[in-house]
Amino acid sequence: MGQNATLDEQMLHLKLDGWCVVENVIPADEVEGVRESVLASTLKHQRSDAPAQIGHRTGLINYNQSFAPYLITPHFLDVIEAALGSPVRVSFTSAMINYSGNARGNLHADWPFNQHNAGHIPAPYPDIVAHLTTLWMLSPYTPENGATIIVPGSHRMETNPSADSCSHDENDPYPTETQVSGAAGSVLVMDSRMWHAAGANRTEEARVAMAIRFAPWWLNLNGLRPGSGERARLMKTTGLNENEVEAVRKEVYAGLPPAVKPLFEHWVEH
């Protein structure tokens, strides 16, 4: 389901199955430049705690802004706003590179539904769209190069494999799981409750992607803020760790296209 799908069709797919693919968010003649830019930034600023054969850089917007103009591509942003309401906010920007030979990941749901995080919505979950994960295919997504594994419909389950209440082991494949293929420049949009995992890259080429997550205006993000008292209390109370999303640097924010700035204005450093 791509650019030519109607918004109603995409929203129905998102509601029933928990995901849809929006094609040509980054035009075919422009995606290579973004891919090479994100790859170079990730190599330069690689997180030291990234898993083996994975390139990872959180807070990507501070290190690379080549993708920023595409965040407001109309046929993409329409889907995000239809699902979450308006205005929406970007909560995470991360580069994710699966190098040749990376292992399959574990099945999980994303923040705030991952029960391993200090700030999480406890299972059983209310049936509400509270957060969206978008995976930007800067390389083509294929089963051979580690395309994301999803369990369609799992966003309507009351739990996920990160919870003790879930009977399915996070390391075991799920009977109805599938891999999402797509052309470079496409974006997989999924409810953050969706059970998903990284696929194993069996090719010789790196698979380059970004995870950009979106929150509605009403979702509390303060537990992700570096140095916040709320984040410290959550970790102390639960005994769990929490993601830390670094603030957008003032000079980075100043250089963003005017129409993109509202997506990040809530997270600019003080």
Image (cartoon, rainbow, N blue to C red):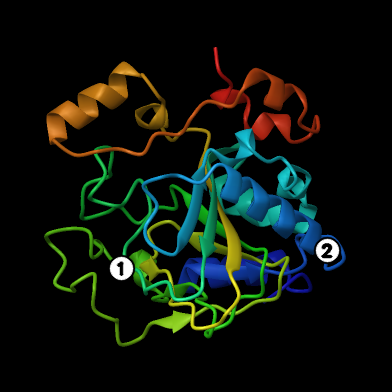
Total marks shown come to: 2
- Read off the residue under disc 2: 27
Q: Nearer the viewer, residue 257 or 37?
A: 37
- Read off the residue under disc 1: 106
Q: CA distance from mark 2 to mark 1?
A: 32 Å
Q: Residue at x 42, y 69 (%)?
A: 198
**Residue 182: quarter of image:** bottom right
The reply to whether dot 2 and dot 1 touch (C-beta < 8 Å) is no
Q: Residue at x 30, y 87 (%)?
A: 175
Q: Amino acid at mark 2?
A: Pro
Work out which quarter of the rendered image holds the N terminus and state it: bottom right
Spot occupied by residue 113 in the image (x, y as percentages of width and height) = 31, 51
Residue 154 as seen in the image, left or right of residue 46? left
Spot occupied by residue 263 in the image (x, y as percentages of width and height) = 64, 35
Q: Nearer the viewer, residue 111 or 50?
A: 50
* Crowd tier of the residue under label 2, counting other residues whose Cα lies within 10 Å: few below 14, some 14–19, many 20 or above: few
Q: Amino acid at mark 1?
A: Asn
Disc 2 on helix, strand or loop?
loop
Q: Residue at x 42, y 72 (%)?
A: 102
238 to 66, vertically: above or below? above
* Crowd tier of the residue under label 1, counting other residues whose Cα lies within 10 Å: few below 14, some 14–19, many 20 or above: some
